[in-house]
Amino acid sequence: MPTEMHLAQLNVGTARYDLDDPRMAGFMDRLDEINALADAAPGFVWRLQSDAGNATDIKTTDDPLFILNLSVWQSIKELGDFAYGSAHQPIMAQRRQWFEPPIEAYLTLWWIPAGTVPTPEEALVRLAHLNQHGPTAQAFTFKTTFEPS
């Protein structure tokens, strides 16, 4: 019997300002609301978070303005429904107000065995793979997807 697979998702950004800067308030003030919406969304499995309830204080690089969001979902459709069909979408539409324009891919997807969770380090390797090789089964996008293997 094939192993059940879940979808891992990473998106990253470099904030334009310190997270406690008033110019970031429109983003920071909505984090708890959007995270609660994700937690209750159909297909949601897990998200990386610190004791603060989000991942903004989890540092994976030397850049204090670099933040990431790492989550696991049951399917591409359910993640897509949340990302593009909920209150999350208007926040995404304002992304450039709070984050530097990306110079390469800032979101990647990949399949993982159900019951496991990715590490930030693994996720960043997947993103680097996407940026170096384009979409593959190792790291892909909503536009170019791959079935679990």
Image (cartoon, rainbow, N blue to C red):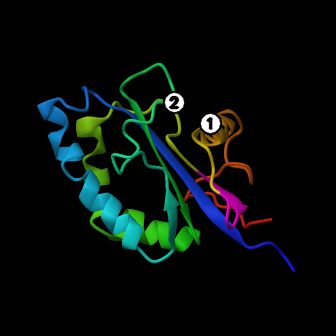
Q: Secondary structure at mark 2?
A: loop
Identify which residue is drawn at 24% across, 47% down.
Answer: 94
Magenta segment: 109-116
Q: Nearer the viewer, residue 98 or 37?
A: 37
Percent across and percent down for residue 40 are 38, 73
Percent across and percent down for residue 117 are 63, 55
Amino acid at circle 2: Thr
Quadrant of res 13: top left
Give the spatial CA distance, label 2 vs label 1.
7 Å
Give the side of residue 105 with respect to residue 31, left or right: right
User: Which quarter of the rendering shows the C terminus?
Assistant: bottom right
Residue that mark 1 sits on: 121
Q: Which mark is residue 60?
A: 2
Q: Nearer the viewer, residue 55 or 42?
A: 55
Percent across and percent down for residue 80 are 47, 67
Identify which residue is drawn at 47% across, 29% down.
Answer: 103
Identify which residue is drawn at 40% across, 62% down.
Answer: 83
Residue at the front extreme?
Answer: 51
Give the side of residue 122 with respect to residue 63, left or right: right
